[in-house]
Amino acid sequence: MNISGQAALVTGAGSGLGEATARELARLGAKVAVLDVNLANAMRVAADINAAGQGSAVAVQCDITSTDSLLTALAQATAAHGPARILMNIAGIGTAKRVVGKDGNAAPLEDFARVINVNLVGSYNASRLFAAECAKLPPLEDGERGVMMFTASVAAFDGQVGQQAYSASKGGLVGMTLPMARDLAQHGIRVCTVAPGLFATPLMKQLPEAVQASLAASIPFPSRLGKPEEFAQLACHIVTNAHLNGEVIRLDGALRMAPR
């Protein structure tokens, strides 16, 4: 699919990997809906995109765990840019808790459920609503109607101590990729997932520089943190490469996470 002129939805686009992806889509000529639970962040990104004069953007507040919020957000995005053919599922949260804490107590079930609800259920929620609308659109070349991407993590495969909830949520996205692609093939909608490793996101930059350097050194090559722009480039390549479907792609510099 040619990105130029297409309407795109990017969840979690107010910062980090989502922000970089929204900017790259706009640079390639897309009309981007910057979806984020933090409206101030979404407005900042959209304003920057519009000021740059490449593509266009609209900021939309959106909580992917709420169907009502998603429906409102999709209606606002459609009103601004027309129906979307591209969905980038990038919104997510992280946590780390041992099953049995230092106090001897079991980890709170609510913490586990929250991560699953945002990362896995929320991504599915956005995808099912997007797919239902996208399936109604006229087909493009090769019968294609749309493309969606999930954002997993290397933690889906190499989860570390304390990452039970995060790894389970990202592993769920990995497991959902192929059946989702098979399900939506009849509608001409492709589905892929990117599993990033250690990236220089705002969350990562909050860590002490010594910790960041140690994490970067654990990556075989290149021995540095990934750049959000590199994630965005792969996300956009998935859109433009029509034969990529049902695939999970690790983007990690050959990193394999140690137990802790």
Image (cartoon, grey):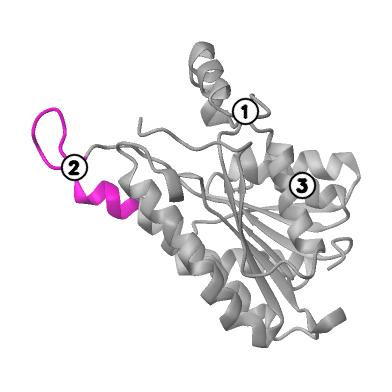
Point out the tag, 3 or 1, that comes first from the N-terminus: 1
Nearest the viewer among 186 and 215 is 215
Q: Which of the 4 quarters of the picture holds residue 107? A: top left
Work out whether residue 41 can be spotted. Answer: yes
> What is the tally of numbered marks visible in this picture?
3
Q: Residue at x 27, y 37 (%)?
A: 97
Q: Residues within 10 Å of mark 1 (few under 14, many from 20)?
A: many
Give left or right: position of 220 versus 167: right
Point out the tag, 1 or 2, that comes first from the N-terminus: 2
Q: Is residue 63 magenta?
A: no
Residue 259: mark: none
State how far apart marks 3 and 1 are (Cα): 16 Å
Q: Which residues, given as a range, are shown in magenta?
A: 99-114
Name the residue tied to disc 3: 233
Q: Which of the 4 quarters of the picture holds residue 94? A: top left
Give left or right: position of 149 versus 237: left
Residue 107: mark: 2
Q: Is residue 108 magenta?
A: yes
The percent coordinates of residue 236 (x first, y second) are 77, 54
Q: Residue at x 73, y 40 (%)?
A: 230
Residue that protrudes farthest toward the left in the picture: 104
Work out whether residue 140 can be spotted. Answer: no
Residue 225: mark: 1
Q: Residues within 10 Å of mark 2 (few under 14, many from 20)?
A: some
The percent coordinates of residue 215 (x first, y second) are 52, 23
Amino acid at the residue labelled 3? Gln
SS at circle 3: helix
Amino acid at the residue labelled 2? Ala
- Quarter of the image with the C terminus is top left
